[in-house]
Image (spheres, coloured by chain):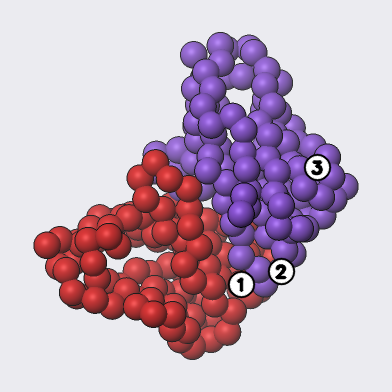
Amino acid sequence: NAGVTQTPKFQVLKTGQSMTLQCAQDMNHNSMYWYRQDPGMGLRLIYYSASEGTTDKGEVPNGYNVSRLNKREFSLRLESAAPSQTSVYFCASGRQIRNTEAFFGQGTRLTVV
Amino acid sequence: QKEVEQNSGPLSVPEGAIASLNCTYSDRGSQSFFWYRQYSGKSPELIMSIYSNGDKEDGRFTAQLNKASQYVSLLIRDSQPSDSATYLCAVMITGGGNKLTFGTGTQLKVEL
């Protein structure tokens, strides 16, 4: 009954360090998403993937890269972390892009100092 | 203009009352609409989806959609203190690619 699993749950980075946030889903969903959530800003889409092998930019892609490794996994990479990337990151997945609900992981709280 | 707009609140209602949450969206081609509930420090949880004009009821929750007015709402009947949370409206925006786009959320407080 795992659903969408994100690792790690918490992370502190120094400015300029790199890291990869991992996301895996076991619901055989086609679409996957990465969001960031900041106070007063709601959920903002960073990147999404409609299917294995495809990725598209969302509202705030700068400073991030993604990889859809296979149908289950969608990773988010910060190549050179900046304090402005301090946020809570959520991964979500859905069966298909149209007419479907998205289900969320538990989130990763990232602090860049 | 934001693609999905909600009043940030807080919206305060007494226990047992009806809470009414509203959302407007800009993309006329959108076909899929969702309401999520998010407790503080937790991840969003889907509570309703709606795809056709009209009302859709699920327990104490009713989602209403009016595509002509580009308006989605959520009614919570017999509000309970446990309903106190932030409610996020989400729309599948079809223009320029299919993106699940969220409003900033409305904070609901149900008072005893």
Q: Secondary structure at mark 1?
A: loop
The image shows residue B93 at horizontal and vertical percentages of 64, 63
**To which residue does mark 1 refer?**
B32
Find residue A14 and report its image quarter. Answer: top right
Give the side of residue B63 with respect to residue B30, left or right: left
- Give the crowd class for mark 3: few <14, some 14-19, many >=20 residues within 10 Å: many
Cα gap from disc 1 to disc 3, whole angstroms: 24 Å
Letter of the purple chain: A
Q: Is residue B30 visible?
A: no
Cα gap from disc 3 to disc 2, whole angstroms: 19 Å
Q: Residue at x 62, y 43 (%)?
A: A5
Q: Chain of mark 2?
A: A
Which quarter shows the C terminus of chain B? bottom left
Letter of the red chain: B
The answer to whether marks 1 and 3 sit on the same chain is no
Q: Secondary structure at mark 2?
A: loop
The image shows residue A88 at horizontal and vertical percentages of 50, 35
